[in-house]
């Protein structure tokens, strides 16, 4: 057993090395690689992906896993969970023919390159055939991995175990029933919140200084966390000592980068505070996309958009943008940061309307994967749902179907995690409030106790516990989306005087 465990750990280390290399290449491609570099990147990604696939499906790994799982009782908790996770992943991976897996990785790399060019050019026609190819791969992969499930359920399960269309249909129906009346009441109320002071010229070099300050307030260890600049912000982590977040600066929109840094910083805090015993382990990451998004949405919205947080950071903002913020008060900033109004861009959406953006993508993904909607019909379907759910017209594909990077990366089934994560975050906050006075701490810029609480209840476990276990561990009760709708109803009723 000792020899099997030693060989198993060595195999994991080699798998991690290839994943690390692929991850660094992805980060490099998104942040600093010259545009023409994409032509050579695909081949390198193909070679590394092939080796990664071989390691993930190696016969010697299968034998080791068989031995380990037959002797679960003799294993420590980490090794046991690693064996369980790798066995499950291997079962899925080996069902996908290697040639198809490698070809998919190369197609994904090319789709990402084309999307980066197509989005600013408003050229959906250039991206469409690449999207169609990725969807075809995803349908086939879903059939290989979980033939007993509808294809979209199989894809959802990759991001949030056990999540199904049946569950999501009920969840989103409840969200619509409870939040649409609030959205309509705000529209009927007619109160306009001033945000004009946020559309001035805010020098990007000063915004970078603000990002550094925000990361410091969030207790993010900069020795372990870098920040880059990209078209669409994301976070990637290679181990708890190397996490990379990204943002996109807009000179005429101060809060865009501000909140992308807080959002991605929430992801980073999760990865940075996983247990030391999970260092470079496949378990040393978030339990699911929903749990991961609960942390980014928790910091972005519940902490970052609170009046206590904005009052604390406002002096630094004034120091950096004295002329631009002349005459602005912390309360004005709080109202502006929480204005609710139907909008085009998901990443810029307010908390109240945010899940409507997710519903658009969910409905489209279901149809795309089921073959009920073609990629050529997608822009028209997108625009129709934005009119139906948010009451707005989409002027172009740049601000419509091309706005997100997820589909260019083949991430179908991911989007619902954002809404589920927001609901998790509200329930986690309610539980946290029973133990510590969060607004009082945030108002003093003392976020360490908040991070400590989350570390104790969620972060340190990495993938050791499943999402449902983590929520019950943190909250004392199973997941209940009522916390989410109650939180939003109360907050926006107070802001708009409903």
Image (cartoon, rainbow, N blue to C red):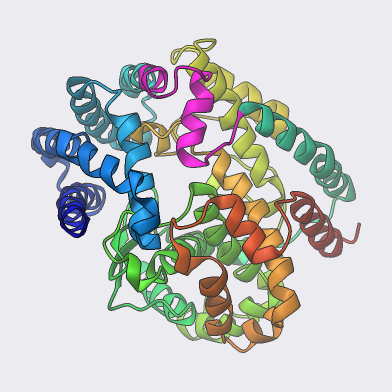
Left or right, residue 260 beside residue 390:
left
**Who is closer to the viewer here, 9 or 468?**
9
Residue 219 x/y as whole percent:
45, 80
Q: How many marks?
A: 0
User: Is residue 154 rendered magenta in the image?
Assistant: yes
Looking at the rendered image, the quarter that the N terminus falls into is bottom left
> What residue sits 63% from the left and 58% below the top?
471
Left or right, residue 6 beside residue 137:
left
**Who is closer to the viewer here, 310 or 426?**
426
Hey, which quadrant is residue 178 in on the image?
A: top right
Residue 284 visible to the viewer: no
Above or below 54: residue 1: below
Hey, which quadrant is residue 118 in on the image?
A: top left
Above or below 252: residue 153: above
Residue 240 x/y as whole percent:
32, 68
Q: Outermost residue, bottom direction?
A: 444
**Who is closer to the viewer here, 413 or 328?**
413
Residue 290 x/y as whole percent:
54, 49
The main secondary structure of the magenta stretch is: helix
Above or below 86: residue 137: above
Left or right, residue 33 beside residue 447:
left
Q: Outermost residue, right direction?
A: 498
Residue 203 visible to the viewer: yes
User: Is residue 222 rendered magenta in the image?
Assistant: no
In magenta, the rendered stretch is 138-164
Above or below 380: residue 461: below
Residue 362 x/y as whole percent:
58, 30
Left or right, residue 235 beside residue 368:
left
> What residue sits 69% from the left and 45% below the top?
353
Looking at the rendered image, the quarter that the C terminus falls into is bottom right
């Amino acid at each position: 057993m000792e020899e099997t465990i030693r060989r198993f750990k060595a195999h994991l280390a080699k798998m991690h090395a290839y994943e690390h290399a692929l991850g660094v290449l992805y980060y490099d491609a998104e942040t600093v690689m010259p545009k023409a570099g994409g032509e050579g990147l695909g081949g390198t990604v193909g070679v590394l992906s092939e080796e990664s696939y071989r390691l993930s499906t190696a016969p010697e790994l299968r034998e080791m896993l068989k031995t380990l799982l037959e002797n679960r009782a003799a294993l420590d908790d980490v090794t046991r969970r690693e064996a369980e996770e790798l066995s499950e992943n291997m079962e899925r991976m080996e069902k996908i023919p290697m040639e198809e897996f490698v070809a998919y990785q190369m197609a994904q790399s090319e789709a990402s390159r084309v999307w980066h060019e197509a989005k600013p050019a408003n050229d959906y026609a250039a991206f469409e055939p690449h999207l169609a190819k990725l969807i075809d791969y995803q349908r086939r992969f879903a059939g290989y991995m979980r033939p007993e499930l509808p294809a979209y359920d199989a894809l959802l399960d990759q991001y949030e175990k056990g999540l199904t269309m049946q569950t999501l249909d009920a969840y989103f129906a409840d969200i619509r029933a409870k939040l649409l009346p609030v959205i309509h009441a705000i529209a009927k109320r007619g109160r306009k919140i001033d945000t004009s002071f946020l559309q001035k010229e805010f020098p990007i070099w000063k915004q970078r200084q603000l990002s550094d300050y925000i990361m410091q307030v969030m207790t993010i260890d900069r020795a372990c966390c870098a920040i880059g600049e990209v078209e669409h912000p994301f976070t990637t982590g290679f181990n708890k000592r190397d996490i990379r977040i990204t943002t996109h600066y807009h000179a005429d929109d101060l809060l865009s980068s501000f909140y992308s840094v807080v959002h991605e910083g929430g992801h980073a805090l999760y990865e940075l505070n996983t247990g030391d015993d999970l260092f470079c382990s496949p378990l040393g990451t978030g339990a699911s996309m929903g749990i991961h998004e609960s942390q980014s949405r928790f910091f972005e919205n519940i902490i970052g958009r609170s009046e206590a947080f904005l009052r604390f950071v406002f002096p630094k903002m004034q120091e950096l943008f004295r002329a631009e913020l002349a005459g602005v008060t912390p309360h004005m900033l709080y109202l502006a940061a929480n204005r609710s109004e139907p909008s085009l861009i998901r990443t810029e959406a307010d908390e109240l309307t945010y899940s409507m953006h997710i519903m658009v993508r969910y409905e489209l993904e279901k149809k795309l994967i089921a073959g009920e909607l073609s990629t050529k019909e997608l822009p028209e379907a997108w625009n129709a749902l934005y009119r139906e759910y948010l009451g707005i017209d989409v002027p172009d594909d740049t601000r419509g179907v091309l706005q997100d990077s997820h589909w260019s990366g083949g991430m179908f089934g991911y989007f619902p995690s954002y809404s589920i994560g927001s609901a998790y975050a509200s329930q986690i906050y309610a539980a946290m409030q029973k133990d510590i006075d969060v607004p009082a701490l945030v108002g003093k810029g003392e976020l360490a106790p908040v991070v400590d609480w989350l570390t104790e209840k969620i972060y340190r476990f990495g993938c050791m516990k499943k999402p449902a276990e983590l929520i019950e561990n943190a909250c004392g009760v199973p997941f209940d989306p009522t916390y989410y709708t109650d939180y939003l109803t109360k907050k926006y009723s107070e802001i708009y005087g409903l």
